[in-house]
């Protein structure tokens, strides 16, 4: 593989990671809590796509994966809503570590639920766009890579418009900033936190659909996705949406380049070592911490 | 004595006897397979007991406990296979290795905020896992290390079955003893305050970094001990021992059993080790059930099964009787009111993001003097207290206390030097009695105290005696046996006052002690404060209203928008036009 090839694959991987990391930050900002199930939701999104593909007549369609995307996102959103009501709401007045643990519990249930249901074997989702790879000036660019980047870009743009340009987005940000004040102003905080969970989980599930065609999916894949989103958000600046996207691309490019130079597992090891270095030297993230210093 | 009273007086001892009898009875019918399962439960119980130090007692979510377990397993196995060491040598060596790793890692990551600490410990765990998979020549890679010898102690091969199981459970008993001592020591009480109220712990002279480090190192030692026992019980080790699943299992055991209870750790470990055996038919779904159980317990019983049982016990039999505590009268007034300042601020300033919260304040307080600090909301009153007590580092200016510059000292050091403070909301640990909430500030606890049996722990006894006297002095003697969770806001503040007094401070800083009190209560609070000052202690009282402070204080300074706009005697302050303007919002004073 040439370096240009690696850059293209890295960007596609980064685009998918960006969705996962954005979902992580949306939930973080709305609740102040880490959603440890974020990676398992990616995995669950992959399996949801596989189940839906079996139910729907996708045989002759040119864009089987893209046709599934809205359904997978909605299914993920429903799961997020459930998580908000079951694993977050009863614990909202307790220290953040309680939600950390309850989402670990959700992650365990997703992972072992998938394992009990589908078994441990690798599976793959249908391609987003059917057809062979394209040849662009000597570079082989798979349609899947292009479609991942395009889909992720469209979703990130939509999310940006939703958060920055609509009343709903302003309310969402207000509720995240100060839930008590927002409640006093008549903003339905409960529904908005549930919405943040739904958006966050929907993004994760969508990323699962995007990734599981190239990289396959197994029930135990969640932890790696969770770690990568968590690392992306940490180096991008805790609580920053832009930082999460930038961090996701950095993590993905690092993974591809180090994987090419060494091996996949050494690339992971170097990523964790780099994370520890960042935490020790620049705990506010590479681009500064948006959420501010916490006492 | 009623039957209930008799039962309550016996405490938990019969339960332990019953449990031991149950295990013995189980042993008579158990085959080798069951005994092995029991031994594996013991290995996990030790790891969970260790996890409670960092996660339960200190309250930091470490995700490295599985890694310490796996490290202990690999280290002991490798020393047995490559160096030919017997268990008597590889066991302590494996623990030492894990402790060294924890000390190195903890030295840096323990300072991180909780969400970063969790991530950093997870990253360390994943690094170890990768190492175990990839360093094939040492670890055997994905296949792991087969034929690890069993327990060999000084050329004696401990037979499998009962002897090996007893060896494991002997270690568990020793671990449980250390954990019990920790809970019942001044050191452990301090850790509980640290978990519940980190700022209050610092104000009580507790060094958070050192105590977190102790918790982390203990967790690593116990984790490695569990892992080393595990590998010699099983005879093999593979990278699975370092997978995140082990961490998750230990977390589930700790939360479901009870994150702060020794019995809970053992119960959780035994329960989760045996559940898959009891539900063989649902193989594969057992871990799903762990997840569901974890979620259920986190929501419905935050202190786990052991905590729920303890709560029921308290409801049926009432709170445990307070130990008889002799009162140690506070030492007589050491200093007399004199003219030399005990605490002084020189041109103290701090800004938050460009907003100047305090702009060069200079003031002092003498021994035995009550200094009132008034000002409208947002004028910088609490900022002054946070600077003096060491929670904020000033951008400029100096703080002198008892003849030395303390500007660079952390809050807990200043507290140890005799600078005490209270908080607006009455910061107490919910699960400690008022007596113990005060006692944590009365003695200098050390980790070595944990090696002393509770009955012989004179340090805690002395601390409780002084705490009891301090509660008397703060008018809170009747609250001694109540838990922090059961106190009202004004009761909590009285207990806090006692905690501030118990270390015989030279200066005491009080943040709005009169907020929410009735006029009668304010009157008795004034009497208490005058009594404190009469003992030669400098008192700084912050309040936003004049009616409480003016009759009380010897001198008053008035803050507005981060500046001292007036200073003087109460009557001078009351007459000062600047002060009235600040309070009345710019209305010209006639």
Image (cartoon, coloured by chain):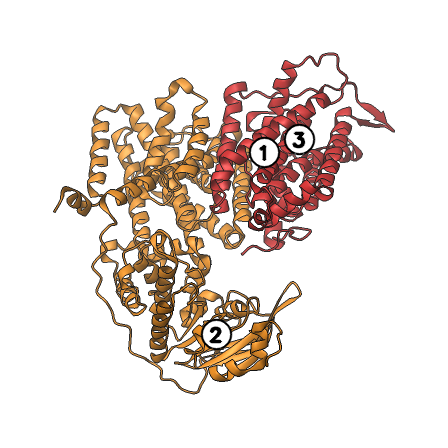
Chain colours: A red, B orange
Determine crowd level at label 1: few under 14, some 14-19, many 20+ residues with C-alpha closer than 10 A: many
Instruction: Kindly state the secondary structure of the residue where label 1 is placed.
Output: helix
For label 3, the residue is A207
Q: Specify the quadrant that holds the C terminus of chain B.
A: bottom right
Q: Residue at x 51, y 80 (%)?
A: B574
Residues B130 and B202: in front is B202
- Does label 2 lie on the same chain as label 1? no
For label 2, the residue is B546
Chain letter of the residue beneath label 1 in the structure image: A
Determine crowd level at label 3: few under 14, some 14-19, many 20+ residues with C-alpha closer than 10 A: many
Residues B240 and B41: in front is B41
Query: Where does residue A141 sit, x and y in percent of width and height?
Result: 80, 27
Q: Which mark is residue A39?
A: 1
Label 1 vs label 2, nearer the camera:
2
**Residue B78 left/right relative to A119:** left
Query: Where does residue B458 sit, x and y in percent of width and height?
Result: 25, 61
Q: Is residue B454 visible?
A: yes
Instruction: Kindly state the secondary structure of the residue where label 3 is placed.
Output: helix
Q: Earlier in the sequence, mark 3 or mark 1?
A: 1
Residue furthest toward the left? B1
Q: Is residue B207 visible?
A: no
For marks 1 and 2, give the CA distance.
56 Å
**Residue A72 left/right relative to B451:** right
Chain letter of the residue beneath label 3 in the structure image: A
**Does B358 appear above or below B206?**
below
Q: Residue at x 59, y 29 (%)?
A: A78
Quarter location, residue B166:
top left
């Amino acid at each position: 593989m040439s370096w240009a090839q690696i850059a293209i694959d890295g960007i596609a991987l980064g685009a998918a990671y960006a969705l996962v990391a954005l979902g992580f930050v949306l939930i973080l900002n709305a609740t102040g809590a880490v959603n440890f199930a974020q990676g398992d939701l990616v995995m669950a999104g992959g399996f949801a796509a596989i189940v839906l593909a079996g139910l729907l007549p996708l045989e002759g369609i040119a864009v089987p994966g893209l046709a599934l995307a809205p359904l997978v996102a909605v299914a993920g959103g429903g799961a997020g809503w459930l998580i908000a009501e079951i694993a977050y709401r009863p614990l909202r007045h307790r220290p953040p570590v309680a939600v950390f643990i309850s989402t670990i519990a959700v992650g365990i249930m997703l992972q072992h639920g998938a394992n009990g249901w589908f078994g441990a074997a690798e599976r793959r989702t249908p391609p987003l766009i059917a057809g062979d790879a394209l040849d662009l000036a000597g570079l082989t660019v798979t349609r899947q890579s292009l479609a991942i980047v395009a889909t992720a870009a469209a979703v990130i743009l939509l999310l940006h418009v939703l958060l920055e340009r609509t009343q709903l987005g302003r309310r969402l940000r207000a509720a995240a900033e100060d839930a008590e004040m927002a409640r006093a102003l008549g903003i339905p905080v409960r529904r908005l936190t549930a919405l943040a969970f739904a958006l966050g989980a929907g993004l994760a599930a969508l990323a699962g659909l995007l990734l599981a065609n190239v990289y396959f999916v197994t029930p135990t894949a969640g932890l790696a996705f969770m770690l990568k989103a968590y690392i992306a958000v940490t180096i991008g600046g805790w609580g920053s949406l832009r930082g999460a996207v930038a961090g996701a691309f950095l993590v993905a490019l690092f993974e591809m380049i180090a994987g090419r130079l060494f091996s996949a597992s050494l690339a992971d090891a170097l990523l964790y070592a780099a994370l520890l270095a960042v935490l020790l030297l620049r705990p506010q993230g590479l681009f500064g911490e948006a959420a501010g210093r916490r006492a | 004595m009623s039957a209930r009273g008799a039962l309550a007086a016996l405490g938990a001892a019969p339960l332990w006897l019953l449990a031991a009898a149950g295990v013995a009875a189980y042993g008579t019918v158990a085959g080798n397979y069951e005994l092995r399962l029991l031994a594996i439960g013991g290995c996990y119980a030790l790891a969970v007991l260790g996890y409670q130090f960092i996660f339960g007692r200190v309250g930091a979510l470490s995700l490295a406990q599985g890694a310490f377990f796996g490290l202990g397993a690999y280290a002991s196995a490798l020393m047995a296979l490559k160096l030919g060491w017997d268990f008597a040598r590889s066991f302590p060596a494996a623990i030492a290795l894990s402790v060294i790793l924890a000390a190195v890692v903890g030295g840096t990551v323990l300072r991180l905020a909780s969400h970063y600490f969790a991530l950093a410990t997870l990253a360390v765990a994943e690094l170890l896992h990768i190492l175990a998979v990839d360093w094939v020549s040492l670890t055997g890679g994905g296949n792991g290390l087969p034929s690890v010898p069993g327990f060999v102690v000084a050329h004696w091969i401990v037979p499998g079955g009962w002897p090996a199981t007893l060896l494991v459970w002997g270690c568990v008993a020793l671990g449980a003893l250390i954990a019990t001592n920790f809970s019942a020591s001044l050191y452990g009480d301090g850790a509980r305050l640290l978990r519940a109220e980190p700022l209050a712990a610092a104000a009580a002279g507790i060094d958070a970094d050192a105590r977190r480090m102790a918790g982390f190192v203990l967790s690593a030692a116990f984790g490695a001990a569990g892992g080393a026992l595990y590998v010699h019980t099983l005879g093999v080790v593979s990278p699975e021992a370092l997978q995140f699943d082990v961490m998750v299992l230990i977390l589930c055991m700790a939360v479901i059993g009870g994150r702060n209870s020794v019995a809970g750790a053992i119960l959780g470990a035994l329960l989760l080790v045996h559940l898959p055996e009891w539900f063989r038919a649902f193989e594969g779904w057992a871990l799903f059930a762990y997840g569901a159980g974890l979620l259920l317990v986190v929501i419905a019983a935050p202190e786990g099964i052991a905590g729920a049982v303890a709560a029921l016990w308290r409801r049926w039999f009432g709170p445990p009787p307070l130990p008889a505590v002799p009162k140690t009268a506070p030492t007589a007034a050491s200093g007399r009111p004199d003219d030399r300042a005990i605490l002084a601020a020189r041109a103290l300033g701090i800004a938050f993001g460009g907003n100047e919260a305090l702009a060069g304040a200079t003031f002092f307080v003498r021994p035995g003097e009550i200094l009132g600090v008034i000002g409208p909301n947002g004028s910088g009153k609490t900022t002054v207290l946070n600077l003096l007590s060491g929670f904020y580092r000033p951008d400029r200016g100096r703080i002198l206390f008892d003849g030395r510059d303390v500007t660079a000292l952390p809050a807990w050091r200043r507290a140890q030097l005799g600078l005490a403070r209270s908080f607006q909301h009455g910061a107490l640990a919910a699960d400690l009695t008022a007596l113990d909430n005060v006692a944590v500030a009365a003695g200098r606890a050390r980790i070595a105290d944990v090696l002393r049996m509770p009955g012989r722990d004179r340090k805690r006894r002395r601390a409780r005696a002084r705490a009891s006297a301090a509660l008397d002095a703060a008018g809170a003697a009747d609250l001694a046996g109540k838990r922090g969770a059961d106190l009202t806001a004004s009761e909590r503040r009285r207990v806090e006052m006692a905690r501030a007094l118990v270390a015989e401070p030279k200066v005491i800083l009080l943040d709005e002690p009169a907020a929410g009190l009735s006029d009668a209560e304010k009157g008795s609070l004034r009497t208490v404060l005058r009594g404190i000052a009469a003992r030669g202690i400098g008192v700084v009282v912050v309040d936003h209203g004049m009616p409480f402070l003016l009759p009380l204080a010897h001198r008053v300074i008035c803050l507005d928008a981060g500046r001292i706009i007036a200073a003087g005697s109460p009557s001078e302050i009351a007459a000062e036009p600047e002060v009235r303007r600040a309070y009345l919002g710019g209305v010209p004073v006639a």
